[in-house]
Amino acid sequence: MKIEQRCTVPVAREPLWRFLMDVPAMAGCVPGVEKVEPRGDNRYEGRMKVRVGPIALTLDGAMAVREQDDAGYRAAVDAEANDRRVGGGVHVNAQMSLRELAPGETELVVTTDARLLGKLGEFGQPVIRKKADTMMAEFARNVAARFRE
């Protein structure tokens, strides 16, 4: 399943980019993320709790920053996570880019190619897209709040 999401963050592009490339700090703004631990070479392990429809998942997994283009404000990541209790999981390849809209305002574009496995894969695309959109909007609000502190 492919999903493209866009949001506007009231932060200048350069400081937003630095923040997003600090994965443990950025992860603190992702709804449901409980922990992120660096494992070297732009690799991380973590845990995220998320509810999709009637199912609550605890996803344990790993993420790697595959590409990071500081000059072009683009990055690509691969992630894989599973919930052993429920029997669901996700494999994700995502690309992120930043576009300056105005001084102090940046558009974040995330394009995701996700494979949903097990119980998670049983949900239809509209349910998954709605959950992804809700999480992106909350992430953008959390990032904006972080920069207001």
Image (tube, helix red, strand yellow):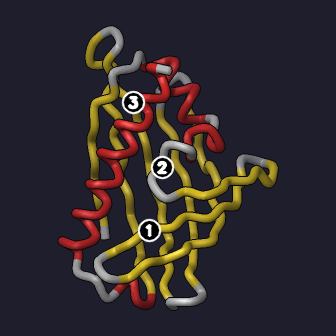
The residue singled out by tag 2 in the image is 30
Q: Give the residue at x 41% y 16%.
A: 12
Nearest to N terminus: mark 3 or mark 1: 1
Nearest to N terminus: mark 3 or mark 2: 2
Quadrant location, the N terminus: bottom left
Residue 108 as seen in the image, left or right of residue 87: left
Labels in figure, total: 3
**Vertical relation: 72 (above or below) 90:** above
**Vertical relation: 122 (above or below) 98:** below
Q: Give the residue at x 39% y 28%.
A: 144
The residue singled out by tag 1 in the image is 50
Q: Under tag 2, what secondary structure? A: loop
Q: Under tag 3, what secondary structure? A: strand
Q: Under tag 1, what secondary structure? A: strand
Residue 1 as seen in the image, left or right of residue 33: left
Closest to the observer: 127 or 73?
Answer: 127
Nearest to N terminus: mark 2 or mark 1: 2
Q: Measure the alpha-carbon separation of dots 3 and 2.
A: 17 Å
Q: Measure the alpha-carbon separation of dots 2 and 1.
A: 11 Å
Q: Position of residue 135 (x, y in %)?
A: 35, 54
Q: Give the residue at x 48% y 61%.
A: 93
* Mark nearer the viewer, 3 or 1: 1
Could you classify mark 3 by the number of other residues whose Cα lies within 10 Å: few (under 14), some (14-19), or many (20 or more)? many
The residue singled out by tag 3 in the image is 98
Could you classify mark 1 by the number of other residues whose Cα lies within 10 Å: few (under 14), some (14-19), or many (20 or more)? some
Q: Residue furthest top?
A: 103
Q: Quadrant of residue 126?
A: bottom left
Q: Position of residue 11 (x, y in %)?
A: 39, 20
Amino acid at the residue labelled 1: Val
Q: Measure the alpha-carbon separation of dots 3 and 1.
A: 26 Å
